[in-house]
């Protein structure tokens, strides 16, 4: 977590200062757009498409990704978290002993909200948004900005 926070502190990436909503408040909007018969599948999600979290309990007054990251502790996280962020996540377990279930997101009309994994999603978005971060060449150019 220290490495992620240090990178974000020095970053000028505009993405880090975008407003992040709480999914509970956007339910009336997303409910109106939902179609019957939702489907579950894996896809690459553009960082800017993620506009809301299921909760912000770890930083209740935070309004941006940068401010949300400041509220995370990540005391049980190692650099394996960064490897996880830079990989194909799918149903992969997050490498922290206190993590519950795989990352889960809900998409409606191009808007994406995180329904499980708010802490890791916040850290991942902050880490991946910084254009100076180093990607791993073995993962291919798709994982590099």
Image (cartoon, helix red, strand yellow):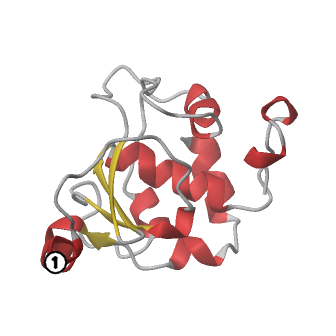
- On the picture, is 6 further left or further right than 20? right
Question: Looking at the image, which is closer to me, 80 or 114?
Answer: 114
Outermost residue toward the top? 97
Residue at the location (42% across, 28% down)?
A: 91
Q: Residue at x 37, y 57 (%)?
A: 71
Residue designated by label 1: 32
Q: Position of residue 28 (x, y in %)?
A: 12, 78
Q: Quadrant of residue 63?
A: bottom left
Q: Position of residue 12 (x, y in %)?
A: 70, 74
Where does residue 82 sit, x and y in percent of width and height?
62, 36
As rendered, which of 50 and 8 lies closer to the eye?
50
Mark 1 falls on what kind of element? helix
Indicate whether 91 appears above or below 2. Answer: above
Q: Residue at x 42, y 33 (%)?
A: 75
Vertical placement of residue 11 versus 105, above or below? below
Q: Quadrant of residue 61?
A: bottom left
Q: Is residue 44 left or right of residue 143?
A: left
User: Is 82 positioned to the left or the right of 45 in the image?
Assistant: right
């Amino acid at each position: 977590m220290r490495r992620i926070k240090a990178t974000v502190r020095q970053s000028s990436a505009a993405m880090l200062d975008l407003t992040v909503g709480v999914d509970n408040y956007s339910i009336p909007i997303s409910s109106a757009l939902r179609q019957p018969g939702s489907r579950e599948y894996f896809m690459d999600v553009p960082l800017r498409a993620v506009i809301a979290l299921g909760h912000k309990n770890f930083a209740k007054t935070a309004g941006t990704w940068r401010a949300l990251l400041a509220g995370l502790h990540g005391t049980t996280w190692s650099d394996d978290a960064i490897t996880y962020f830079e990989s194909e996540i799918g149903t992969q377990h997050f490498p922290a002993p206190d993590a519950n279930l795989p990352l889960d997101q809900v998409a409606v009309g191009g808007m994406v909200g995180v329904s499980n994994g708010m802490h890791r999603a916040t850290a991942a978005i902050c880490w991946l948004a910084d254009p100076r971060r180093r990607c791993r060449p073995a993962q291919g150019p798709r994982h590099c900005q």
